[in-house]
Structures are given as C-alpha cells and as structure tokens.
Image: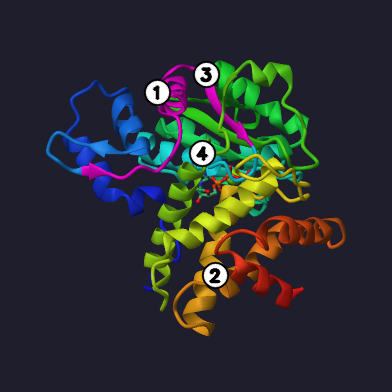
Amino acid sequence: MGLLLRQHAEQQFEEELYELKKNETNKVPENWQLSPQSVVTYLMGGKLANGFEVTPKYIGHRRLIEIAVATLVTDRALLLYGLPGTAKSWVSEHLAAAISGDSTLIVQGTAGTGEEAIRYGWNYAKLLAEGPSEGALVQTPVMRAMKDGKLARIEELTRVGSDVQDTLITILSEKTLPIPELDREIQAIRGFNVIATANNRDKGVNDLSSALKRRFNTVILPLPDTIDEEIDIVRRRVESFEAVMDLPAEKPALEEIRRVVTIFRELRQGATEDGKTKLKTPSGTLSTAEAISVVNNGLAMSGYFGDGRLNATDLVSGIIGAVVKDPVQDQVIWQEYLETVVKGRDGWKDIYRASREML
Ligand SMILES: Nc1ncnc2c1ncn2[C@@H]1O[C@H](COP(=O)(O)OP(=O)(O)OP(=O)(O)O)[C@@H](O)[C@H]1O
Ligand SMILES: [Mg+2]
C-alpha cells in the first residue's frame, strides 16, 4: 500500500492520544475516549505526569477550547464560527479525534447538500427490489454517530439550504432520527453530538434559523492576536508539511516566515505594524492558512527550482497570488504597498526587486 497523502488526526497523533489515555486521572464521560481536561491538553499541548510532551494543535486562547469542550459534554451542539482560515475545520477534526477517537464522520455542506446527506438515503436498486428495508437504507455519518455515540462533523453548515439545515433540529433536540418508511427510529446513544463549522465571509450563505441557533453554542475563532503568535502557527504547520512532503529544501529561516506574515497582517489590517502608514486592503482574505500555503509553495520552488534556500524570489509569486485576487484593484493596492512600504524597509529590497520583475 502506498503512503497516505494525509492522515486523519487520530492516526497522525495516535501516540499522543495513547499517552493521554494512559495518564488519565479525571472522569471520562460515557463513550468519550478522554476526559474533558485531557481533550483540552490534547488541543493546547502540555506535559503529562510521566513527562510525555503533547504538542499544541491550536495556538490561541485556551478559554475558547475549554468552552468548546464543555459544550460538547452538554446536550448543546457546537458551532465554530469565524473568518476563513482561522482553524475551524482543524479544531473540529482534533476535537472529534480526541473525544471520539474518530474524526471521519463528516458531512461537507454545500448548496447541493440534501436531506439524505444528513438523515439517510436509499440504495435504489435494493429499494426497488426489496422495498423499504434495513438493507436498502444508506446510513449517513450523522446516523452512524448517533448509533455509535460519537461526534458528527458538519462542515460549512451555512452553505446548506435552510430547509435542509432544519432537519438537524429533531436530531439535536430530541436526539432521535425517525425513519417513517420503516416505522422505526434511531435513538442517539451517549457521546453523540455535532460540531458544525461556518465562516462569515463566503458569499451565498444561508443564515442559521433561530430555532437551530438555539441548539448550538457558538464559539468564534479569532484571527491570531499578535504577529508572533501568527508566525508560530505558520512555522509549526510548515515544519509538518516539510516532514510529510520530504522536500529537498532547507528549513525556512524564521525571518522569511516573519516577512510573509508581516505583509499579510499589514494588508489585512490596512496599516503598517508600526501604525504609521495607512494602507488599502485587498479583496482577498489573506488568512493564516494562505500564509502557510505561500511558505509551503516557496519551499517547493526553492527545493526544486532554486538553490534549496528559501528566498524572496521563491516567495513573491505566492504572495502576489494571495494578494492580487482582483486583477485590477488589487494590483494597484499591491503596487502602492511596494512603493510606499516595501521599497524603503530595511532588508526588504530583495522582495521589491523580485516583485518588480514579476509584474
Ligand atoms: N490559531 C491557530 N492555531 C493552529 N493552527 C492554525 C490557527 N489558525 C490557522 N491555523 C492553521 O490554518 C490552517 C487552515 O485552517 P482551517 O482549514 O481549519 O481553517 P477554516 O477556519 O476551516 O477555514 P475555512 O473557513 O476556509 O474553511 C490549518 O492548517 C491550521 O493549522
Ligand atoms: Mg474549514
């Protein structure tokens, strides 16, 4: 079998989850793999009693993760809400891995998501041959989560049409899924709950109905507070990408990551870090997730087509790609930024030159 391109969190962090379980001293809720306290340690990182180091997965406020975990113990579902690239899907995956030992019970919400993707569907060949029967039923991840007492993940809930969203109401309030065709129901067992994610930037979103909103506790994941926090996030993700991709490039100098993050933050906030120069904001989101891709891309460029050391030339095409989403307006904004900020900044001449060559 070939190596997996991407492992699920519970596979990649199997050892950490095993050690957390071994060192468990707190009460573990029914059908959970770990106690709420250990789940938070898994997400935020920490040292266990036996000296084992758990790596941080989420960089940010511990309180947010505590609220998220506490919500999942109750009978309210969890909605992770925020701008694109603020680790909503990432946190959802790790919560499911730590709590249920399984992050794969997932429904990807789109405008085309129908009821049958959330409740159940039918295998039509069997349905025609046998009529409605247990065997003709196609289970959804939500149904399996209910049966097994696990967490179901619903990604991008607000892209799903409102009528389909509302099929969750019975599931969340009554903890049951009626199957009228078979004259029976699936009753959720303990440990079942739902984590949904939604972002507040994408177009074409359907607001949650107030009936559904009341069944969710919303936790808003913010952009990283400080530049150092954001650099730390990018560095950690880039290092794990390098390990997986086995690139012929050196570890990026922290300085290069700092420059990419600085550019993203300045354009995002519409002012230089020192607050002295006002800037126009481009149309793209310039999220932390995009900063991670820019550095990863630069590493691939430097490894295969450069000298193996990440430099401005390797990074600039990615930076421009992230900044210039609208070919006219954003192009002007980038040019202005180059002339007013990059050109005069100490040690940034190489970015200025590389960018001028590209445009
Ligand atoms: N605070 C953070 N701590 C750790 N990793 C982070 C943080 N913010 C962003 N990331 C990283 O950014 C990447 C993208 O995150 P993710 O895909 O979860 O974003 P999202 O909020 O679901 O975005 P979208 O709304 O576009 O779906 C992940 O690899 C994650 O590691
Ligand atoms: Mg996401």
For the residues labelled 4 and 1, the Cα–Cα distance comes to 39 Å
Residue 293, by quadrant, is bottom right
Q: Secondary structure at mark 2?
A: helix
Q: What range of the chain is rendered magenta?
A: 53-82
Q: Which mark is residue 28?
A: none
Question: Relative to 299, is 52 on the left or the right?
Answer: left
Q: Is residue 201 above or below residue 14?
A: above
Q: Which mark is residue 76?
A: 3
Q: CA distance from mark 4 to mark 2?
A: 23 Å
Cβ atoms under marks 4 and 1 closer than 8 Å: no
The Cα–Cα distance between marks 3 and 2, rounded to whole angstroms, is: 43 Å
Label 3, label 4: how many angstroms apart (C-alpha)?
32 Å
Q: Residue at x 46, y 48 (%)?
A: 233
Task: Return the disc, 4 or 1, that comes first in the chain's sequence.
Answer: 1
Vertically, is 251 above or below 52? below
The residue that label 4 is drawn on is 226
Question: Tag on residue 190?
Answer: 1
Q: Position of residue 118 (x, y in %)?
A: 62, 37
Nearest the viewer among 23 and 336 is 336
| Label 1: few (<14), some (14–19) or many (≥20) C-alpha neighbours in 10 Å | some
Residue found at x 68% / y 45%:
268
